Amino acid sequence: MDWTCLLSPRRHPERENAPGDPRSEFLRDYDRIVFSTAFRRLGRKTQVHPLTINDHVHTRLTHSIETGSVGRSLGLHAFELLRDELPPHTPPAMLGEIVQAACLAHDIGNPPFGHAGEEAVRAFFAEAPDHLVENLSPAQRLDLATFEGNAQGFRIVTRLEMSLNAGGMRLTLPTLGALLKYPWTSEHPVARQKGKFSCYLSERATLDEIAQRLGLPPGTEGGFARHPLAFLVEAADDICYSILDLEDARELGLLSFAEIMAALGPLADSLGGPARDASLHQRRRLSYIRSQAIGRAVEDAARAFADHHRAILAGAFEKSLLDVCSEATRQGIAGAKELARGRIYTNTRKIELEIGSFSAIGGLLQVLCTAVWEKLARGRVSGRGQRLLRVLGEHAPPDDATLYEGYMRVLDYVSGMTDQYATLMAKQIGGLAENLSVR
């Protein structure tokens, strides 16, 4: 891969850049994402804890903003370490602006209720009645039964948001490349094994075009090699959620302050000073620890990126940057993740609400997909189905759509819902709501 091609500020689809705009093309990407309705809705989507009333706990929106901030720092550090390897006259802020924009959009396709929402969609299509899926190809069934927030996000930014079916947000190629954490479809071996992919069949031609224009080489098992900056986006996300999930857990009383101190100790240069000042509120003490831990992880991840950049450019690097950082950073991140798996993600209230999300999302998909099936497969729509198609609004499929396209439109509608809206819609459609309005 070649940095000149990888960083060229061309857009998808190809179009002339705006003359006289003092912003860089990548700052324009950032602004488009910030002002999108899909990004705005992240404010009421679960990061880890569904439907919490504690305003200090992260949502997908605050997580995305903070990940963007960390991503920008990673990009700035990477530039300083690699400036002699980059094209002449590369602006010092360029890498940071690209990574920040991609980080901002990295969760834009996540459904309501977090990862439980993804699992609920997958479960519905994996167990759907035969008549709903018998007209789908095996590849189309696989797409739906392995629903992925990353792939939905790619669909949003390249098709749905802003310029509908005409390039979406029309972001720059470098930002799109950095966003592609898994640049392959659901048929790729990694997708089959781990359910991880960044592109549905419906956007495969778009992926192929973007990869060709960026110069991303084909992968050994299909798909493409990652854009180098995608490694920085991944690192920013990992740093933020592994550290900040602990902070949220303390806010909710799931972890003690001492447990967090012990977990993040390897990442902090020093846990003296404000961290041990008992006269300070624990939020202030935690913010000091968090700042030190994130700063250390950012420096180490940027150094790892610089150390391995030749293998990354060759498409031969297949690890996470955090896996090749210093021992202290590896231990700190691993310890934080282990603590979260054992004490946070298994919390009873969280699990109870996630179980409820299966009913809410499954119920919505059942009635909406049935209405779409009646229109596109059976050719006769019931009275209830007609009403449900009107509920879909602009997401309702046209008469000439395929069944796969119809179901994708249902997923666009349901996955775009906030936690609260999905809960209310499920109640209303199920006849359980009392004097409530969804508007």
Image: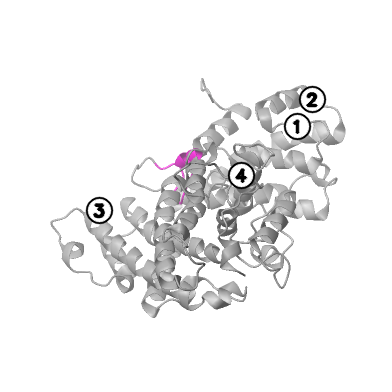
Q: Quadrant of the N terminus?
A: bottom right
Q: Residues within 10 Å of mark 2 (few under 14, many from 20)?
A: few
Which region is colored magenta? 40-52
How far is the residue under mark 1 from the one under mark 4? 42 Å
Mark 3 or 1, nearer chain start: 3
Which residue position is annotated with label 2? 382
* Type of the residue with mark 2: Ser
Residue drawn 35% across and 43% down? 54
How far is the residue under mark 3 from the one under mark 1? 49 Å
Where does residue 308 sit, x and y in percent of width and height? Answer: 51, 77
Which residue position is annotated with label 4? 16
Which residue position is annotated with label 1? 371
Camera-side residue: 263 or 356?
Answer: 263
Q: On residue 283, which mark appears?
A: 3
Where does residue 219 sit, x and y in percent of width and height? Answer: 69, 70
* Nearest-to-viewer mark from 4 and 2: 4
Per the image, label 3 sits on a secondary structure element best described as helix
Where does residue 236 sit, x and y in percent of width and height? Answer: 45, 61
Examine the image and state in which quarter residue 74 appears: bottom left
Per the image, label 2 sits on a secondary structure element best described as loop
* Nearest-to-viewer mark from 2 and 3: 3
Mark 4 or 2, nearer chain start: 4
Residue drawn 53% across and 24% down? 439
Per the image, label 4 sits on a secondary structure element best described as loop
* Type of the residue with mark 3: Arg
- Residues under numbered marks 1 and 4 in contact, where contact means CB atoms less than 8 Å apart: no
Q: Residue furthest top?
A: 435
